[in-house]
Image (cartoon, rainbow, N blue to C red):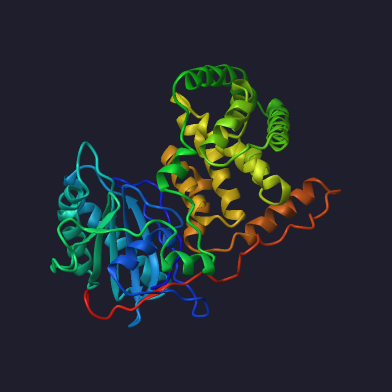
């Protein structure tokens, strides 16, 4: 089965499903032969460890090549499971037909950590009716579920296996991250795992506590001052210039003060470097489409890293009543991630942008293009050309090419032989 990274944005009860296209025959292959290897491979298929997620992967051909995949959150209410199962099965099967061919089978993963004193085994039991509804929904489309796994508390269970010797009631332990043959093969093939879905989303989630209260007050002050000027055609251009100048000032500040380490601590560092009023001014300025489009040009070379740090930090500052304003910085964060080759993070950011504002057209277009496997280079070149038109003296940067490691029309592939159980 082949791997293509995919994430999703919210819609339906828990998420707007996204499907990525299948790979090409020339790509390197990794063979998976057991449920344990499937469970181990899941983070490499997506590019992150899914949490509270339903993941479905289409399987094609007698050798079991992975095709499109879909991820949505697991609905909290069991009453939503039947409709969700029908919707995601339809989405994956029809999307696969549209891109390549109808799947010959589907692999289902239900990933959820225990809550409220639950055991992993209890999670597996609680989600069993959902797994059954998914199998029925796929079967109604004449596509069998070859394997359905529950991953919880560091263990996995198969919903399709009744052999206690193979799948004991207490489940089987997952391989520790990074220690398996699959991990070594995936690393060799260039597949990366960028932490968990929860961790990635956490870096883009609004701040809480005293910082949030102070930021919301700053946003109120900025809105009172800036919004009338943005709506006034005579001062709109002036506001745009001021917004972009402030954003560049903040990017320079971030560049000159790199964090000592990555992850959430780096975000704390960046948050401390941005004043509330500074952040508020840029957030509100980015609500203007033309200003945002110019900011989208900072997607490569030495501008990409500080721009991504800035967009993440501004997304975290969209607090309280200004949550919808996060669509702009979130979409910009997704765009820079996609432009620099980090598709899994890009899809997550686009999904969060659509959660903030489901009608945000820029996020809709980029989310769709990323999920369709479209090469971002076309949009990158359009932005470069627009910038050259606006800045005639600007030359094309020497490094303004495809991000390192990107290969036109190619994605890494993994395969699983589907003989035996699950046929």
Query: Residue at (35%, 47%) from the top-left corner?
Result: 11
Q: Is residue 191 left or right of residue 72?
A: right
Front position in the image: 203 or 261: 261
Q: Is residue 344 left or right of residue 137?
A: right
x then y, percent, for residue 399: 75, 57
Is residue 25 shown above or below 3? below
For the C terminus, the quadrant is bottom left
Q: Is residue 295 left or right of residue 213?
A: right
Query: Residue at (45%, 67%) from the top-left corner?
Result: 21
Front position in the image: 145 or 156: 156
Query: Residue at (65%, 59%) from the top-left corner?
Result: 403
x then y, percent, for residue 337: 57, 50
Residue 347 visible? The answer is: yes
Residue 228 visible? The answer is: no
x then y, percent, for residue 249: 72, 31
Query: Residue at (46%, 61%) from the top-left corner?
Result: 5
Front position in the image: 283 or 417: 417
Front position in the image: 407 or 160: 160
Place residue 352 in its image quadrant. Answer: top left
Place residue 288 in its image quadrant. Answer: top right
For the N terminus, the quadrant is bottom left
Is residue 187 shown above or below 117? below
Q: Is residue 12 left or right of residue 3?
A: left
x then y, percent, for residue 126: 16, 49
């Amino acid at each position: 089965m082949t791997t293509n990274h995919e994430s999703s944005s919210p819609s339906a009860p828990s998420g707007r499903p996204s499907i990525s296209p299948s790979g090409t025959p020339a790509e390197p292959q990794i063979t998976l032969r057991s449920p344990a290897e499937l469970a181990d491979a899941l983070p490499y298929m997506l590019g992150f460890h899914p949490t509270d997620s339903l993941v479905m992967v289409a399987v094609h051909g007698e050798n079991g090549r992975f095709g499109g995949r879909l991820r949505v959150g697991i609905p909290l209410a069991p009453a939503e499971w039947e409709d969700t199962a029908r919707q995601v099965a339809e989405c994956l099967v029809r999307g696969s037909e549209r891109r390549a061919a109808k799947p010959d089978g589907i692999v289902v993963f239900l990933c959820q950590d225990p809550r409220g004193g639950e055991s992993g085994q209890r999670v597996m039991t609680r989600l069993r009716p959902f797994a059954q509804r998914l199998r029925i929904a796929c079967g109604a489309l004449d596509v069998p579920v070859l394997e359905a796994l529950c991953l919880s508390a560091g263990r996995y269970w198969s919903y399709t296996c009744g052999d206690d010797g193979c799948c004991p009631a207490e489940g089987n332990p997952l391989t520790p991250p990074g220690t398996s043959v699959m991990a070594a093969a995936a690393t060799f093939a260039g597949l990366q795992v960028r932490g968990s879905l929860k961790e990635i989303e956490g870096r883009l989630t609004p701040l809480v506590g005293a910082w949030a209260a102070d930021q919301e007050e700053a946003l109120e002050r900025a809105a009172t001052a800036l919004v009338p000027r943005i709506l006034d055609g005579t001062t709109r251009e002036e506001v745009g210039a001021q917004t972009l100048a402030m954003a560049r000032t903040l990017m320079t500040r971030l560049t000159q003060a790199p964090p000592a380490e990555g992850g959430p601590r780096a975000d704390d560092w960046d948050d401390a470097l941005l004043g509330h009023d500074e952040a508020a001014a840029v957030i509100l300025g980015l609500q203007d489409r033309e200003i945002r489009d110019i900011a989208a040009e900072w997607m490569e070379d030495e501008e990409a890293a500080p721009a991504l740090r800035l967009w993440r930090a501004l997304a975290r500052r969209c607090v309280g009543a200004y949550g919808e304003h996060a669509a702009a910085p979130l979409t910009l964060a997704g765009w820079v991630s996609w432009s620099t080759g980090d598709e899994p993070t890009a899809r997550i950011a686009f999904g969060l942008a659509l959660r903030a504002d489901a009608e945000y057209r820029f996020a809709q277009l980029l989310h769709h293009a990323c999920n369709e496997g479209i090469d971002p280079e076309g949009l990158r070149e359009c932005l470069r050309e627009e910038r050259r038109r606006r800045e005639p003296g600007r030359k094309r940067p020497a490094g303004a090419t495809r991000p390192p490691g990107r290969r036109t029309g190619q994605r890494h592939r993994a395969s699983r032989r589907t003989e035996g159980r699950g046929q």
